[in-house]
Image (cartoon, rainbow, N blue to C red):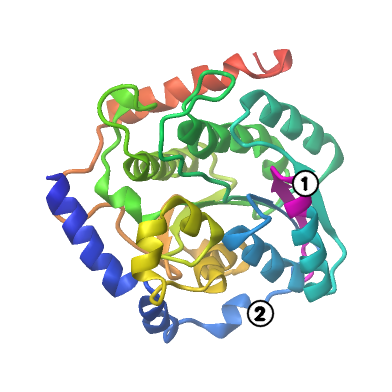
Amino acid sequence: MSLYRNTVWFMKGLREYTKGGYESAAKYFVAEDLQVDVKEKSYMITGANSGIGKAAALAIAKRGGTVHLVCRNKDRAEEAQTEIITNSGNDRVFIHLLDMSDPKKIWEFAETFKTQNRLNVLINNAGCMVNKRELTEDGIEKNFATNVLGTYILTRALLPVLENEEGARVVTVSSGGMLVQKLDVSNLQFEKGTFDGTMVYAQNKRQQVILTEQWAKAYPKIHFSVMHPGWADTPAVRLSMPDFYEKMKTRLRTEEQGADTVVWLTISPAAVKHPSGLFFQDRKPVSTHLPLAWTHSSADDEEKFLQILQDMALKFAPSSKL
């Protein structure tokens, strides 16, 4: 089955995820969708110092939004902040230093942020693909800690401030790679079997899709969406997938093309005309499963997955959240 999934997915990717796929889809984009003034709104973007996160931050800043860059590296964050301010003419671009693999620090950051700021939109963009199994100081597998638990804690902690705003949104940057994975609640941190960073990442991205679907049901005041940026030429791709990059580099999307649907989901009035909880590609909702791939999970497994995340998150929460 995995061979079937991977083959069908790669052929789909060659048609849809490349620069050519973007250019074909873009013929049907409505330019007015992004002609939006967001001066009165506040946005948080994780992993915003490079790649798709930085491209999205710049697009939002150009339209007047207040942008909170959540980054791990101080020097890269300051460099990105300067570039965004210079190219947008908008000085309301702020840095917050945070490692998204550190659950305790995420809780602490979110609790402080809520007391000092408004927030209209959260963009969960930060991610990693560590190709050898590595544990954080808390004993959590690094990819899972960053891509899933970190995303869960930050979103959960910021829900109260988001619910205070009319038309709040949460956008999560996932990957089409999740199409080759079925939720596996028995091995969330890949303690069993061969460790393959690409498949670990794809499993994490499947988990993000399920999280988005469940959040949409639980929090109707907020519009949730998850998306695939396509295959884009970013520093993360070059670092984590060097072989793929060398083979595909002439066909990869630009960072701006990869960020297009993130920006559209973040600011466009057209985006929220779609139901909450959907998976998007090139400004359109698409299926979260390949045909005949048997990747649907049971309601029991999804409930168990959410309970595991909640239990893990609360271990690191401030005492006021227990």
In terms of secondary structure, where does tag 2 sit? Answer: loop
Residue 33 location, x and y as percent?
A: 58, 77
Residue 192 rendering spot, x and y as whole percentages: 28, 22
Q: Quadrant of the C terminus?
A: top right
Numbered disc 1: secondary structure: helix
Q: Which residues are magenta?
A: 63-77
Sooner in the amino-acid sequence: mark 1 or mark 2: 2
Q: Amino acid at mark 1?
A: Lys
| Image location (x, y in percent) of residue 186 | 29, 22
Frontmost of labels 1 and 2 is 1
Give the percent coordinates (x, y) of residue 24.
37, 83
Occupied quadrant, residue 40: bottom right
- Looking at this view, name the residue that lies furthest to the bottom: 27
* Residue at (23, 41) in percent of width and height: 296
Q: Is 120 left, or right, of 8 in this rendering?
A: right
Can residue 14 be seen in this snapshot? yes
Inspect the magenta stretch and tell me whether residue 252 lies in it: no
> Is residue 63 visible in the rendered structure shown here?
no
